[in-house]
Each structure stands twice: as structure tokens, then as C-alpha cells.
Image: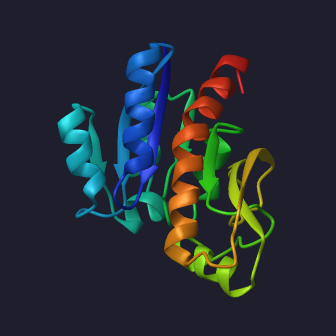
Amino acid sequence: MKRIIVFASGSGTNAENLIKFFNETKTASVVQVLTNNPHAKVLDRCKLLEVSALSFNRMALSKTNDVLNILKASNPDLIVLAGFLWKFPEFILNEFPNKVINVHPALLPKYGGKGMYGMNVHEAVVANKETETGITIHYVNEHYDEGAIIFQAKCEVLPSDSAQDVAAKIHELEMEHFPKVVEDLLNSGN
């Protein structure tokens, strides 16, 4: 069975969706969730779903081999960033080439880069009167949101939509597509 490690920073709805999806398909398993936020709701979700979850600090990720050693010990087939807000260290990416992916709440290359996450993205989409937005699933490289695009899904943005409305539409796209794209990548040997 293929092994997935998920990185998250917040509520963990994408992590939960991935865990439940792979519990049903039996093609892979989320073996661990790692978070940079010791108060993240994703930790509670993992406890309920009986999935190992750990929090770590910036030093453990970027300045030492602590997180790298956890990853090596778990031997993941894919590392999935699902609402993980920190830049992923290049030395870890080098250990797992083409095995780290991210979901971004916009149609990259639009609305990507440092500081462009969550409501910041949705507010920018509405402020710029975009007529469509969506999600981008992409490989992670040493730059924010610049890795090769794997998949995009679009949705309409109505003139009456608020940033919260856009967020709800993006959430639906993530719930529908993210697990399937992860499964396709694992099945193709990414």
C-alpha cells in the first residue's frame, strides 16, 4: 500500500478528506500528518481518525534534520501539502524529488507567491473582479507556487460573490478533486 504524509497548518479539512478517501479506497494510506501549528484543529481531526499527527517548529523543519528524519523513517510515496503555509525547505525537496505536491486556492500563476493563501487569495480575486478562479495542484519547488502544474479546476466568480462565497466554491473544488488527483499520481508512479 502506498504511503502519504500530509502537511497542514490549520483546520485540516483537506487532510481529513484525504484520510477518509484513502481509508475507503485502500490504494494508499495517510500514515502521518505534520503541522507547524501546535494548536491546529488538524491535530484534533487526526486524533478522531486515529492517524498519527505531530507538530514541529520552524527550526525542526528548516534548520535541523528533525522533520527530514521523520519523513525518511516514514518512507512516503507522496508528501502532500494541504493548507501548509510555510515555504518547504530545498534540502527536503532534494531528498524527495517530484514527491511533494501542494494545493493552491487559485489558478496559478495568478494569485500565487508569498502571502497569497486562504482569504488573502479570495479577497484579491474579488477585488480584481475576476470572472473565474479555481484550484491548482502542483509540484513544490524552492519557490512559492512555482512548481509544475499537475491539475487545475475552475469555477465561476459572480459579480455578487464575496470572498467568503469564493472560499466556499474553492473548498468544494478541493474536496472533489484533491483526493482523486493524489490517487492518480500514486497510481502513475508520479
Counting every numbered tag in the picture gives 0
Dividing the picture into quarters, in which one does residue 147 lie? bottom right
In this image, 64 relative to 181: left or right? Answer: left
For the residue pair 78 and 10, the one nearer the viewer reads as: 10
Nearer to the camera, 102 or 97 = 102
Which residue in the rendered view is the most extreme toward the bottom?
127
Residue 142 visible (yes or no): no
User: Which residue is found at the position 40% from the left and 18% from the top?
Assistant: 24
- Side (left or right) of 42 relative to 108: left
What residue sits 59% from the left and 81% below the top? 123
Q: What residue is drawn where x is 67% and y is 24%?
A: 184
Q: Nearer the viewer, residue 9 or 125?
A: 125
Residue 1 pos. (x, y %): 48, 12
Q: In screen coordinates, is 55 left or right of 64?
A: left
Residue at screen point 60% across, 30% down: 180
Please state the horizontal and vertical placement of residue 105, each as a whole percent of the image: 62, 61
Which x, y percent locates residue 188? Answer: 73, 19
Task: Tell me which colouring the rendered structure shows.
Answer: rainbow
In front of the other: 189 or 89: 189
Vertical placement of residue 34 versus 145, above or below: above
Residue 190 placement: quadrant = top right
Let me know if residue 110 appears in the view: yes
Q: In this view, does 155 lie above or below 23?
A: below
Residue 89 screen position, x and y as percent: 58, 59
